[in-house]
Image (tube, rainbow, N blue to C red):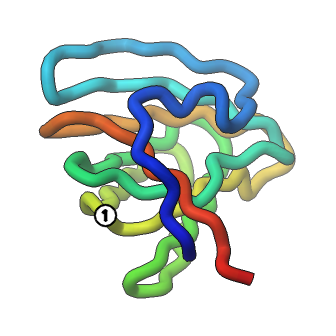
Amino acid sequence: MKQGQPIKDASHLYEVERRAQHAARPGFRITELQLSPTQKVPWHTHSNVSDTFYVLEGQMRLFLQEPKEEVNLKPGEVYAVRPTRPHLVTNAGSTSLTFLVLQGVGEYDYVPLASSH
C-alpha cells in the first residue's frame, strides 16, 4: 500500500449518508458517521491517534493490515485501532450503518492509502 500525504480533514475524500461532530477538544474528537450499504471509509491510517469504533445501528465489517485481520461488529460492540495501523470500514448489512468514532489522544490526521496493485 502506498501512503498519501497526511491531511487534517478527510470529509471530501469519501461520501457518507450523514456526518456529525459530537465533541472536539484539543487532541480528542467524537464523530458520528452513517454509511449506506454501498458506502465505505477507504483504506487509511492515522499518525498519532487511535480510532475507536462504537456501533450504534447496523453491521460493520472492519478490514485491517499489520497484521491482516477482519472484524465484524454489531450494535454495542467496540473495537480500537492503534495509530499507524491501516484500516478500511465497510457496511456489512443491507441497512444503514451508524457508528461513533472516538479519535485521540493526540493531533488528528488522515493518511490515505492506495493498494499497490
Which quarter of the image is occupied by the N terminus? bottom right
Res 76 quadrant in image? top left
Look at 34% across and 48% down and name the residue there.
Answer: 51
Q: Quadrant of residue 100?
A: top left
In the rendered image, residue 93, in percent from the top left (x then y), is placed at 78, 52
Outermost residue on the front side: it is 5
Residue 32 in the image, given as x and y percentages of width and height: 49, 25
Left or right of 28? Residue 75 is right
Compared to residue 77, the image places residue 58 above or below, namely above
Say which quadrant the C terminus sits in.
bottom right
- Which residue is drawn at the image coordinates 58% and 60% (left, top)? 43
Mark 1 is surrounded, within 10 Å at the Cα level, by few (under 14), some (14 to 19) or many (20 or more) other residues, namely some
How far from the left and from the top, in percent, is residue 116?
Answer: 66, 80
* Residue 98 placement (x, y as % from top left): 60, 33
Residue at 27% over, 53% down: 47
User: Secondary structure under badge 1?
Assistant: loop
Query: Residue 1 versus residue 53: which sits nearer the camera?
Result: 1
Q: Is residue 48 above or below residue 10?
A: below
- The residue carrying mark 1 is 84
Residues 110 and 5: in front is: 5
Which of the 4 quarters of the picture holds residue 72? bottom right
**Number of marks:** 1
Q: Amino acid at mark 1?
A: Thr
Q: Determine whether, in the image, residue 51 is placed left or right of residue 44.
A: left
Q: Nearer the viewer, residue 94 or 7?
A: 7
